[in-house]
Amino acid sequence: MLKLKDGSSIAKIGQGTWKMGENPNSRESEIKALKKGLELGMTLIDTAEMYGDGRTESLIGEAITEYPRQKLYLVSKVYPFHAGKGKIFDSCDASLKRLGTDYLDMYLLHWRGNIPLSETVACLEELVKRGKIRRWGVSNFDLSDMEELLTVQNGENCAINQVLYHLGSRGIEYDLLPWQQEKGIPVMAYCPLAQAGNLKCALKNSTGLEEIAQKHGATIYQVLLSFVLANENVVAIPKASKASHVKDNYEAVKIILDEQDIKRLNMEFPPPKRKVPLDIE
Ligand SMILES: NC(=O)c1ccc[n+]([C@@H]2O[C@H](COP(=O)([O-])OP(=O)(O)OC[C@H]3O[C@@H](n4cnc5c(N)ncnc54)[C@H](OP(=O)(O)O)[C@@H]3O)[C@@H](O)[C@H]2O)c1
């Protein structure tokens, strides 16, 4: 678990859901995978109104029906063009309805759009007041966006920034990650298994990564996850629509990379030495 600014806790690892719920033929196995995650204790589920035009949230709603709500940690995201006083309240209600719940644990602005941050933040604070969401955060915000956010009234209430982060895409280590650590705002790492982002092919063909995986009796995907999770200020949300993958991801939490492993990974996939623009999916 990791502490948020408001004193609450969030799990280090959750379940991503992008592209789930889109193909009716995969529905059964996707529900099985989500339930497997819940059974293992991976109760943080990340989704968005964008995913499958709401079908992903509906799939999650079906997977969680028999699970006690207070044990779940549901994160959803609002489209930037819905993140103003005209649409956000309906958007949030629609997400709640599809998920079959009456509150979200976290609501994120999916990426920055044209609606002023001050208006979005005021609406998110209103949603907290109405009890529709417990807290809010942002996604795909680079350092300058985060700095601007903190100048807006109540901007400091931002709980998390969800960004692309994996071994082959380490730009945030230069500035965003240390800045967020200093401000007490964790990073939620998306694409932690390098489904997208820089160097994704290089990762899958890396002998160094393969050897470290063998040393730990793990897969390279588990090593990728343990790399991201090694940072105390990072939460990861790998997506797995196969139950066996969910189990592997859960078990990756136990892998502790040693100094030698990190040295080797740093040689092959060096940390940034200068500012790198935020990688996005
Ligand atoms: N905020 C944003 O803009 C944004 C953007 C992208 C993603 N996200 C969120 O972050 C989540 C994760 O990112 P992502 O889905 O793009 O990529 P990811 O988690 O890096 O990778 C997902 C891929 O890895 C496979 N996989 C999962 N576990 C595995 C394992 N143990 N061994 C081998 N393969 C494994 C999955 O296969 P199977 O599905 O077949 O199991 C899937 O093809 C998303 O689902 C979404 O919730 C947010």
Image (cartoon, rainbow, N blue to C red):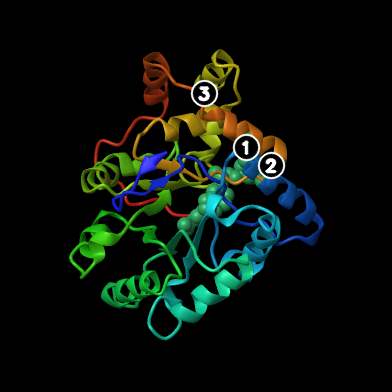
Considering only order in the chain, which callout, 1 or 3, is on the residue closer to the N terminus?
1
For residue 65, what is the image quadrant?
bottom right
* 175 lies above or below 280: above
Report the Cα–Cα distance between label 1 and label 2. 6 Å
Which mark's residue is nearer the viewer, 3 or 1? 1
Given the current orientation, which residue lies at the most extreme left position?
Answer: 151
Q: Which residue position holds label 1?
A: 40
Position of 48 with respect to 100 (left or right) is left
| Residue 38 visible in the displayed image | yes
Question: Pointer 2: what residue?
Answer: 36
- For mark 1, give the secondary structure: helix
Q: CA distance from mark 3 to mark 2?
A: 27 Å
Q: Nearer the viewer, mark 3 or mark 2?
A: 2
Q: Which residue is mark 3?
A: 209
Q: Type of residue at label 3?
A: Leu
Give the residue drawn at x 46%, y 70%. Answer: 132
